Image: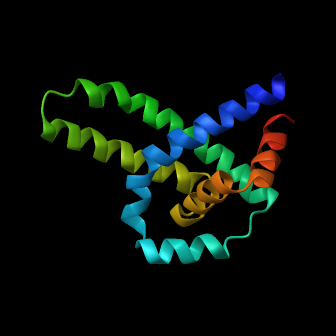
Amino acid sequence: MKKLLVMTTISATIAISAATAAPVMQQKAAQGAAMQQQQQVEITDALLEKFLVAMNDVQQVSQKYGQQFQNAEDQQKKREIQQKAQEEMLAAVNDAGLSPDEYNAVIQRVQQDPELQKRLQEMTSE
């Protein structure tokens, strides 16, 4: 039961992170370069530990600005809120010791690789 809960939490967090961080990461790299980077990133335990920190911080930023974004009165205010959130998400990724490309690569690989999902789950249950 605990493993199922941890995996569900990881999956939900990755989905949230992917959805909220995508605009931030798109600012930093062209799509073709990002795809190439994803194939070159070696997924180590150290990288996954940094990823978990970054993912948690990105999720917190998303939650912090989500309600403000939905309650914004006009498109200009929404853009301002989104810009602040994106800046903070990018800072969170960088502060965790990852580049935006590395962060994106891990998200993509975890979504596609059940073994990597299991590895990440084991790291979170320790």
| Quarter of the image that includes the C terminus | top right
| Quarter of the image that includes the N terminus | top right
Q: Is residue 117 left or right of residue 86?
A: right
The extreme right residue here reads 126
Count of labels in the image: 0
Q: Position of residue 46 (x, y in %)?
A: 78, 57
Quadrant of the image occupied by residue 31: bottom left
Q: Position of residue 38 (x, y in %)?
A: 60, 70
Where 112 falls versus 74 (above or below)? below
Where 32 falls versus 108 (above or below)? below
Quadrant of the image occupied by residue 11: top right
Q: Is residue 45 visible?
A: yes
Residue name at image x 75 percent, y 63 percent: 43
Where 38 falls versus 17 (above or below)? below
Q: Between residues 95 and 71, which one lies in front from this camera angle?
A: 71
Q: Is residue 115 left or right of residue 105?
A: right
Residue name at image x 81 percent, y 46 percent: 118
Quadrant of the image occupied by residue 69: top left
User: By what rule are the colours in the image chosen?
Assistant: rainbow
Q: Between residues 12 and 65, which one lies in front from this camera angle?
A: 12
Q: Position of residue 41 (x, y in %)?
A: 67, 71
Q: Is residue 114 left or right of residue 74?
A: right
Q: Between residues 27 and 32, which one lies in front from this camera angle?
A: 32
Residue name at image x 32 percent, y 43 percent: 84
